[in-house]
Image: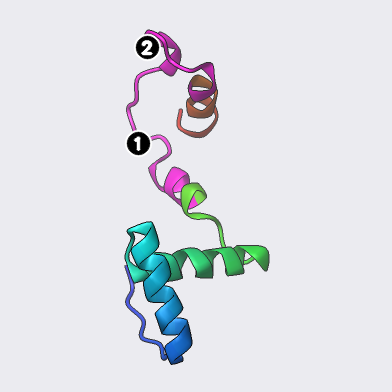
């Protein structure tokens, strides 16, 4: 992962700290999510889930959800579509 440094006005930094605290995630995670949403809205970046699936597709050995007792059929559909 790359590291960047940026300057924030005090009010934006205060808001960032508050959101981070309320959500229980790092300020970096809040900034990454906001940047990802902004870039995605401009059609420039893939979402985190899409990047994760692309990175790991074909490498994960997960059990077939339909074979698991009481498994949600939607999970089986998602696994078949995105992982297997």
Q: Residues within 10 Å of mark 1 (few under 14, many from 20)?
A: few
> For residue 27, which quarter of the picture?
bottom left
Residue 67 within the magenta-colored segment of the rendering: yes
Tell me the quarter of the image containing the N terminus: bottom left
Helix, strand or loop status at disc 2? loop
Residue 12 within the magenta-colored segment of the rendering: no
Helix, strand or loop status at disc 1? loop
Tell me which segment is drawn in magenta: 51-75
- How far across and down, in percent of the image, does residue 44 sit? 62, 67
- In primary-sequence order, the first of circles 2 and 1 is 1
Task: Tell me which residue sits at (43%, 15%) in the image.
Answer: 71
Can see residue 8? no
Residue matched to label 1: 59
The Cα atoms of the two marked residues, 2 and 1, are separated by: 20 Å
Task: Tell me which residue sits at (33%, 58%) in the image.
Answer: 24
- How far across and down, in percent of the image, does residue 57 sit? 43, 38
Residue matched to label 2: 68
Frontmost residue, 15 versus 67? 15
Kindly report which numbered mark, 2 or 1, lies closer to the viewer in this rendering.
Answer: 2
Check the image and report above or below for 49 versus 63.
below
Frontmost residue, 58 versus 44? 44
Q: Is residue 42 left or right of residue 48?
A: right
């Amino acid at each position: 992962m790359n590291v960047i440094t940026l300057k924030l006005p005090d009010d934006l930094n205060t808001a960032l700290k508050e959101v981070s605290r309320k959500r229980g995630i790092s300020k970096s995670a809040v900034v990454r999510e906001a940047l990802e949403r902004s870039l995605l809205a401009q059609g420039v970046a893939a979402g985190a889930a899409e990047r994760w699936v692309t990175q790991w597709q074909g490498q994960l050995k997960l059990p077939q959800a339909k074979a698991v007792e009481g498994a949600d059929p939607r999970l089986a559909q998602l696994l078949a579509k995105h992982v297997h």
